[in-house]
Image (cartoon, rainbow, N blue to C red):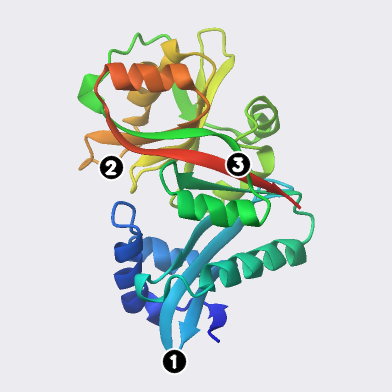
Amino acid sequence: MPDIRPLKAEDWDEFQVMDKDLFPDDAVEEEWFKKRIERDGAFALIQDGRIIGNLIMSRFGEDEAHLGRIGVSKFHQGKGYGSMLMEYAIDWFREEGGIRKVHLYTQDFNKSAQNLYKKYGFKRAGTTWHYFVPYDSLEPKNTYTCQKIQEDEIDSVGSMFPSLPGGQIRRFLTYDEHLVLILKDLNGYNVGVCRFTPAFPGCMPFEITNIECFDDFIEGLKEFKLPEHDYCRVTFTDIPELAELCEARDYRLHHRLHKMTLTL
Protein backbone atom coordinates (compact mmCIF):
# COMPACT_ATOMS: atom_id res chain seq x y z
CA MET A 1 0.00 0.00 0.00
CA PRO A 2 1.14 3.57 -0.63
CA ASP A 3 2.39 5.78 2.18
CA ILE A 4 1.39 9.36 2.97
CA ARG A 5 4.03 11.88 4.01
CA PRO A 6 4.43 15.69 4.03
CA LEU A 7 5.31 17.29 0.70
CA LYS A 8 8.88 18.56 0.42
CA ALA A 9 10.57 21.19 -1.74
CA GLU A 10 12.32 18.52 -3.79
CA ASP A 11 8.93 17.06 -4.74
CA TRP A 12 8.14 20.02 -7.01
CA ASP A 13 9.12 18.48 -10.36
CA GLU A 14 7.05 15.34 -9.80
CA PHE A 15 4.21 17.24 -8.18
CA GLN A 16 3.80 19.73 -11.01
CA VAL A 17 3.64 17.04 -13.70
CA MET A 18 0.79 15.28 -11.93
CA ASP A 19 -0.90 18.52 -10.88
CA LYS A 20 -1.01 19.82 -14.46
CA ASP A 21 -2.47 16.51 -15.58
CA LEU A 22 -5.17 16.50 -12.89
CA PHE A 23 -5.93 20.24 -12.82
CA PRO A 24 -4.86 21.64 -16.21
CA ASP A 25 -6.83 24.86 -15.74
CA ASP A 26 -5.68 25.51 -12.18
CA ALA A 27 -2.20 24.01 -11.78
CA VAL A 28 -0.25 25.64 -8.96
CA GLU A 29 2.87 27.73 -9.49
CA GLU A 30 6.24 26.79 -8.01
CA GLU A 31 6.41 29.88 -5.80
CA TRP A 32 3.00 29.04 -4.30
CA PHE A 33 4.06 25.42 -3.79
CA LYS A 34 7.27 26.38 -1.97
CA LYS A 35 5.39 28.72 0.37
CA ARG A 36 2.54 26.28 0.95
CA ILE A 37 4.71 23.37 2.07
CA GLU A 38 6.16 25.55 4.82
CA ARG A 39 2.79 25.23 6.56
CA ASP A 40 0.99 22.15 7.85
CA GLY A 41 -1.53 20.26 5.74
CA ALA A 42 0.31 19.47 2.48
CA PHE A 43 0.89 15.76 1.82
CA ALA A 44 2.03 13.39 -0.90
CA LEU A 45 0.81 9.85 -1.60
CA ILE A 46 3.92 7.77 -2.30
CA GLN A 47 4.28 4.38 -3.97
CA ASP A 48 7.66 2.86 -4.84
CA GLY A 49 9.29 6.21 -4.19
CA ARG A 50 7.07 8.09 -6.65
CA ILE A 51 4.30 10.62 -6.01
CA ILE A 52 0.96 9.21 -7.13
CA GLY A 53 -1.36 11.56 -5.26
CA ASN A 54 -1.57 14.71 -3.19
CA LEU A 55 -3.62 16.23 -0.44
CA ILE A 56 -3.64 19.90 0.59
CA MET A 57 -5.79 21.23 3.43
CA SER A 58 -5.77 23.96 6.03
CA ARG A 59 -7.60 25.46 8.95
CA PHE A 60 -10.10 28.18 8.09
CA GLY A 61 -11.33 30.73 10.59
CA GLU A 62 -11.69 29.62 14.19
CA ASP A 63 -13.48 26.28 13.88
CA GLU A 64 -13.53 25.35 10.19
CA ALA A 65 -11.13 23.83 7.67
CA HIS A 66 -10.73 23.85 3.90
CA LEU A 67 -9.93 20.78 1.81
CA GLY A 68 -8.19 22.54 -1.06
CA ARG A 69 -6.80 19.70 -3.13
CA ILE A 70 -7.17 15.95 -3.25
CA GLY A 71 -6.02 14.04 -6.30
CA VAL A 72 -4.69 10.70 -7.48
CA SER A 73 -2.63 10.17 -10.64
CA LYS A 74 -4.76 9.02 -13.57
CA PHE A 75 -2.59 5.90 -13.76
CA HIS A 76 -3.60 4.90 -10.22
CA GLN A 77 -7.27 5.85 -10.06
CA GLY A 78 -9.91 3.24 -9.29
CA LYS A 79 -7.73 1.54 -6.66
CA GLY A 80 -9.24 3.09 -3.55
CA TYR A 81 -6.47 5.66 -3.10
CA GLY A 82 -8.92 8.58 -3.19
CA SER A 83 -10.72 7.04 -0.22
CA MET A 84 -7.37 6.52 1.48
CA LEU A 85 -6.55 10.21 1.13
CA MET A 86 -10.02 11.26 2.26
CA GLU A 87 -9.80 9.14 5.40
CA TYR A 88 -6.37 10.60 6.12
CA ALA A 89 -7.78 14.11 5.67
CA ILE A 90 -10.69 13.53 8.05
CA ASP A 91 -8.33 12.08 10.66
CA TRP A 92 -6.08 15.14 10.25
CA PHE A 93 -9.01 17.51 10.76
CA ARG A 94 -10.05 15.70 13.93
CA GLU A 95 -6.51 15.57 15.31
CA GLU A 96 -6.08 19.29 14.71
CA GLY A 97 -8.73 19.89 17.34
CA GLY A 98 -11.49 22.47 17.42
CA ILE A 99 -12.57 21.95 13.81
CA ARG A 100 -16.35 21.80 13.57
CA LYS A 101 -16.88 21.95 9.82
CA VAL A 102 -14.89 21.27 6.63
CA HIS A 103 -15.65 22.79 3.24
CA LEU A 104 -14.44 22.10 -0.29
CA TYR A 105 -15.26 23.03 -3.88
CA THR A 106 -15.76 20.62 -6.77
CA GLN A 107 -16.67 21.05 -10.43
CA ASP A 108 -20.43 20.87 -10.91
CA PHE A 109 -20.02 18.13 -13.55
CA ASN A 110 -17.54 15.99 -11.58
CA LYS A 111 -19.96 13.36 -10.33
CA SER A 112 -17.26 10.86 -9.34
CA ALA A 113 -15.62 13.37 -7.00
CA GLN A 114 -18.99 14.41 -5.60
CA ASN A 115 -19.88 10.78 -4.93
CA LEU A 116 -16.60 10.29 -3.06
CA TYR A 117 -17.27 13.32 -0.89
CA LYS A 118 -20.86 12.24 -0.23
CA LYS A 119 -19.57 8.83 0.83
CA TYR A 120 -17.76 10.56 3.69
CA GLY A 121 -20.66 12.75 4.71
CA PHE A 122 -20.16 15.92 2.68
CA LYS A 123 -23.34 17.68 1.60
CA ARG A 124 -23.90 20.35 -1.00
CA ALA A 125 -23.99 23.77 0.64
CA GLY A 126 -24.05 26.21 -2.26
CA THR A 127 -23.06 27.16 -5.80
CA THR A 128 -19.81 28.96 -6.55
CA TRP A 129 -18.90 30.81 -9.75
CA HIS A 130 -15.42 31.75 -10.96
CA TYR A 131 -15.30 34.45 -13.66
CA PHE A 132 -12.55 36.32 -15.50
CA VAL A 133 -13.37 40.04 -15.31
CA PRO A 134 -11.45 42.40 -17.67
CA TYR A 135 -10.71 45.73 -16.03
CA ASP A 136 -11.59 47.61 -19.21
CA SER A 137 -15.16 46.24 -19.08
CA LEU A 138 -16.04 48.11 -15.90
CA GLU A 139 -18.31 51.11 -15.51
CA PRO A 140 -17.44 52.40 -12.02
CA LYS A 141 -19.65 54.98 -10.34
CA ASN A 142 -16.93 56.01 -7.89
CA THR A 143 -19.40 55.98 -5.02
CA TYR A 144 -17.62 53.20 -3.12
CA THR A 145 -14.06 53.02 -1.81
CA CYS A 146 -11.84 49.92 -1.82
CA GLN A 147 -9.17 49.81 0.87
CA LYS A 148 -7.09 47.49 3.02
CA ILE A 149 -8.83 46.23 6.12
CA GLN A 150 -7.67 47.66 9.45
CA GLU A 151 -7.17 45.62 12.61
CA ASP A 152 -10.09 47.24 14.42
CA GLU A 153 -12.42 46.34 11.53
CA ILE A 154 -11.63 42.62 11.34
CA ASP A 155 -14.17 41.27 13.82
CA SER A 156 -17.09 43.36 12.55
CA VAL A 157 -16.33 42.49 8.92
CA GLY A 158 -15.94 38.82 9.82
CA SER A 159 -19.33 38.83 11.55
CA MET A 160 -20.98 40.53 8.60
CA PHE A 161 -19.52 38.21 5.95
CA PRO A 162 -19.44 34.58 7.18
CA SER A 163 -17.34 33.35 4.23
CA LEU A 164 -14.41 35.36 5.62
CA PRO A 165 -14.49 35.07 9.44
CA GLY A 166 -12.24 37.20 11.60
CA GLY A 167 -9.87 34.37 12.42
CA GLN A 168 -9.31 33.66 8.75
CA ILE A 169 -8.80 37.33 7.92
CA ARG A 170 -6.02 37.44 10.51
CA ARG A 171 -4.52 34.25 9.09
CA PHE A 172 -4.52 35.64 5.53
CA LEU A 173 -2.82 38.80 6.75
CA THR A 174 0.16 36.76 7.98
CA TYR A 175 0.92 35.69 4.39
CA ASP A 176 2.77 38.11 2.12
CA GLU A 177 0.91 36.93 -0.99
CA HIS A 178 -2.57 37.91 0.23
CA LEU A 179 -4.44 41.15 0.91
CA VAL A 180 -7.81 41.49 2.60
CA LEU A 181 -9.70 44.39 1.06
CA ILE A 182 -13.00 45.94 2.06
CA LEU A 183 -15.44 48.17 0.21
CA LYS A 184 -17.12 51.12 1.92
CA ASP A 185 -19.98 53.34 0.82
CA LEU A 186 -20.04 57.13 1.14
CA ASN A 187 -21.26 56.83 4.74
CA GLY A 188 -18.35 54.61 5.71
CA TYR A 189 -20.38 51.40 5.97
CA ASN A 190 -18.84 48.12 4.87
CA VAL A 191 -20.56 46.71 1.80
CA GLY A 192 -17.99 44.17 0.60
CA VAL A 193 -14.88 42.17 1.41
CA CYS A 194 -12.46 39.93 -0.46
CA ARG A 195 -9.17 38.09 -0.11
CA PHE A 196 -7.13 39.40 -3.05
CA THR A 197 -4.04 37.61 -4.36
CA PRO A 198 -2.27 39.91 -6.87
CA ALA A 199 -0.10 37.17 -8.36
CA PHE A 200 -3.08 34.91 -9.12
CA PRO A 201 -4.66 37.43 -9.90
CA GLY A 202 -7.98 37.11 -8.17
CA CYS A 203 -10.43 37.30 -5.30
CA MET A 204 -11.71 34.40 -3.25
CA PRO A 205 -13.83 34.70 -1.20
CA PHE A 206 -15.55 37.72 -2.74
CA GLU A 207 -18.63 39.21 -1.06
CA ILE A 208 -20.78 42.26 -1.73
CA THR A 209 -24.12 43.30 -0.27
CA ASN A 210 -25.49 44.43 -3.65
CA ILE A 211 -24.34 44.07 -7.23
CA GLU A 212 -24.49 47.83 -7.82
CA CYS A 213 -21.14 48.14 -6.05
CA PHE A 214 -19.43 45.39 -8.08
CA ASP A 215 -17.74 47.64 -10.64
CA ASP A 216 -16.42 50.02 -8.00
CA PHE A 217 -14.96 47.11 -6.01
CA ILE A 218 -13.17 45.56 -8.98
CA GLU A 219 -12.02 49.00 -10.15
CA GLY A 220 -10.57 49.53 -6.67
CA LEU A 221 -8.45 46.40 -7.02
CA LYS A 222 -6.41 48.09 -9.73
CA GLU A 223 -4.47 49.97 -7.06
CA PHE A 224 -3.18 46.65 -5.72
CA LYS A 225 -2.81 44.57 -8.90
CA LEU A 226 0.40 43.68 -10.71
CA PRO A 227 1.06 45.78 -13.84
CA GLU A 228 1.04 42.79 -16.21
CA HIS A 229 -2.56 41.83 -15.42
CA ASP A 230 -5.50 43.42 -17.23
CA TYR A 231 -8.14 41.19 -15.61
CA CYS A 232 -9.17 39.80 -12.25
CA ARG A 233 -10.50 36.34 -11.42
CA VAL A 234 -13.52 36.68 -9.15
CA THR A 235 -14.87 33.69 -7.22
CA PHE A 236 -18.09 34.05 -5.25
CA THR A 237 -20.69 31.78 -3.68
CA ASP A 238 -24.49 32.01 -3.70
CA ILE A 239 -24.79 35.43 -5.36
CA PRO A 240 -26.87 34.36 -8.40
CA GLU A 241 -27.65 37.94 -9.40
CA LEU A 242 -23.92 38.62 -9.74
CA ALA A 243 -23.56 35.48 -11.86
CA GLU A 244 -26.37 36.81 -14.07
CA LEU A 245 -24.55 40.13 -14.43
CA CYS A 246 -21.30 38.39 -15.38
CA GLU A 247 -23.12 36.22 -17.90
CA ALA A 248 -24.90 39.23 -19.40
CA ARG A 249 -21.53 40.91 -19.87
CA ASP A 250 -20.19 37.77 -21.54
CA TYR A 251 -17.42 37.33 -18.99
CA ARG A 252 -15.54 34.07 -19.29
CA LEU A 253 -16.87 31.48 -16.85
CA HIS A 254 -13.88 29.48 -15.68
CA HIS A 255 -15.71 27.19 -13.25
CA ARG A 256 -19.12 26.55 -11.82
CA LEU A 257 -18.58 24.67 -8.61
CA HIS A 258 -20.49 22.91 -5.89
CA LYS A 259 -19.52 24.01 -2.42
CA MET A 260 -19.78 21.01 -0.10
CA THR A 261 -19.46 20.85 3.67
CA LEU A 262 -18.89 18.17 6.28
CA THR A 263 -19.87 18.54 9.93
CA LEU A 264 -17.44 16.70 12.19
Residue 19 is drawn in which quadrant? bottom left
Kindly give the residue lying farthest to the right in the view shown: 98
Q: Earlier in the sequence, mark 2 or mark 1?
A: 1
Q: Residue at x 53, y 84 (%)?
A: 2
| Residue 237 image position (x, y, % from top left) | 51, 31
Distance Cα–Cα, label 2 vs label 1: 42 Å
Q: Amino acid at mark 1?
A: Asp
Check contact, mark 3 vs mark 2: CB within 8 A: no
Check contact, mark 2 vs mark 1: CB within 8 A: no
Taking the image as shown, residue 134 lies to the left or right of residue 90, namely left
| Residue 98 image position (x, y, % from top left) | 79, 55
Q: Residue at x 75, y 53 (%)?
A: 99
Residue topped by disc 1: 48
CA neighbours of label 2 inside 10 A, class few (<14), some (14 to 19), many (20+)? some
Q: Residue at x 63, y 56 (%)?
A: 119
Q: Residue at x 70, y 29 (%)?
A: 159
In this rendered view, identify the residue nearer to me: 42 or 189: 42
Taking the image as shown, residue 261 lies to the left or right of residue 96, namely left
Q: Earlier in the sequence, mark 3 or mark 1?
A: 1
Q: Earlier in the sequence, mark 3 or mark 2?
A: 3
Residue topped by disc 2: 226
* Vertical side of 161 occupied by 44: above or below: below
Taking the image as shown, residue 177 lies to the left or right of residue 1, namely left
CA neighbours of label 1 inside 10 A, class few (<14), some (14 to 19), many (20+)? few
Residue topped by disc 3: 169
| Residue 45 image position (x, y, % from top left) | 50, 78
Distance Cα–Cα, label 3 vs label 2: 22 Å
Q: Amino acid at mark 3?
A: Ile
Res. 218 in view: yes
* Vertical side of 43 occupied by 135: above or below: above
